[in-house]
Image (cartoon, helix red, strand yellow):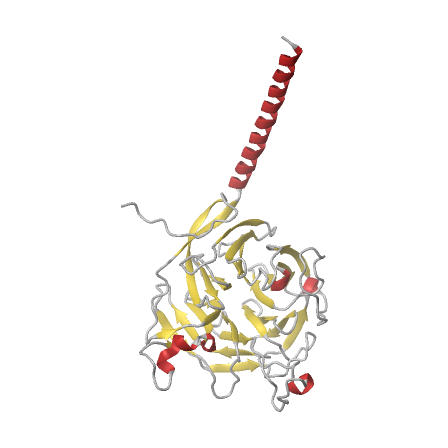
Amino acid sequence: MTRKHLSITAFATVAGALALGSWLIEKRAVVQAATAQAPKFEVDPLWPKPLPNHWVIGTVIGVGIDAKDNVWIVHREGSLEAKEKYATWEPKAATCCVPAPPVLAFNQDGDLISHWGGPGKGFDWPASNHGIDVDHKGNVWIGGNGRGKAPGASALPHDETRMGVGAVHDSFVLKFTQAGKFIAQLGKPFQGKGSNDPDHLKLPAKTLVDPKTNELYVADGYGNRRVIVYDADTLKYKRHWGAYGNKPDDTQLPNYDPKAPLAKQFRTPVHGVALSNDGILYVCDRTNNRIQSFKTDGTYLKETVIEKNTLGDGATFDVALSRDAQQQFIYVADGSNMKVHILKRDTLEYLTSFGDGGRQPGQFYAVHSIATDSKGNIFTTETYRGQRVQKFKFRGVGPVTKRDQGVVWPKLPKS
């Protein structure tokens, strides 16, 4: 055999070995990926049922599940465009439509079972309601992130001090019965004084109540940069903290830069909280694109960054936990990338995602809030022009085959 033929043979052998090695590595990666397990879902395109009375909903800004697996949402009537509510014009411009009451509750079949909300006697209704939670006693909590001009402030646009620019209307949370009867109000409008004020909130985004301690946790929020805790009955202050469990600092941070080191403080908004059965609190630091976890006393545990290069509104809008006994999985609503991410709870390892941008069932426009029921189903709401609530049926746990699953459409029977 000539030297030339030997060289060709050797080259072919090496190339073949490299190709085989690459194939084995790729196959091993696929096998390893397939050994990872994650929950599976499919959208229910027929949930909920149509609303009565020509009602339509605006920006849906919160979702919560009660002990009977009823689904509660809160939306913003004022976010509807003029032509979406022709029937409210004077004179009446058309037979449809009318804004639905801000608080709506649905049963598992998608039937509307309760509706109420709006300004009333003895309490201040948010200028822009935000977040809803139903606690273990059946109480309904609502926050808000609406701003506004403080009473008595000057209308001169150049005089920021007189305009009360530092003040915001929604510096409180409200507590109601499920029938809509007012129970209590924590805070008053225009009273928020900053992230180390124990007595007042400032644009609180979301609440939850720990059933073991009856403590109210507030993601506080759009004006402040903290988690704050109160007694859920007396509303007495307990404790608060910022990012990494540190004392919060209201110094204005520069715009988020994915190439910069992670910020030592929360950026606004501190947007979501979820508490596990074993006492770990998960906090959405939305425009930092991260989830941080803490013990309930504020001790920092760990963090993970989701879609690091996301700018604008950020990637971590809200967080919910799976309903298996160990709560093995975390679900993160990502309103900028239009999907729901699934993580392993113990390690915060990324597993997969579902969803995509669009108007059809299973797609999202700015998925904002997320919650799970006792059966493991997921419920999501959409802000801005999304204006809806969707149900994703839990279909068990199986191997992860794709990082991004796209739209989880039901498998239709073959004709």
Percent of width and height locating residue 139: 48, 74
Percent of width and height locating residue 292: 64, 60
Residue 147 picture quarter: bottom right
Circle count: 0
The answer to whether residue 384 is left or right of residue 159 is: left
Tell me if I can see residue 203 in this picture.
Answer: yes
Q: Residue at x 58, y 82 (%)?
A: 148
Closer-to-camera residue (192/16): 16
Percent of width and height locating residue 67: 44, 66
Question: For the view shown, which residue lies furthest in the bottom direction?
Answer: 152
Percent of width and height locating residue 16: 58, 23
Tell me if I can see residue 327 in this picture.
Answer: no
Question: For the view shown, which residue lies furthest in the top direction?
Answer: 1
Locate the N terminus by quadrant.
Answer: top right
Residue 229 picture quarter: bottom right
Q: Residue at x 29, y 45 (%)?
A: 414
The answer to whether residue 150 is left or right of residue 127 is: right
The answer to whether residue 265 is left or right of residue 341 is: right
Closer-to-camera residue (293/203): 203
The answer to whether residue 165 is left or right of residue 366 is: right
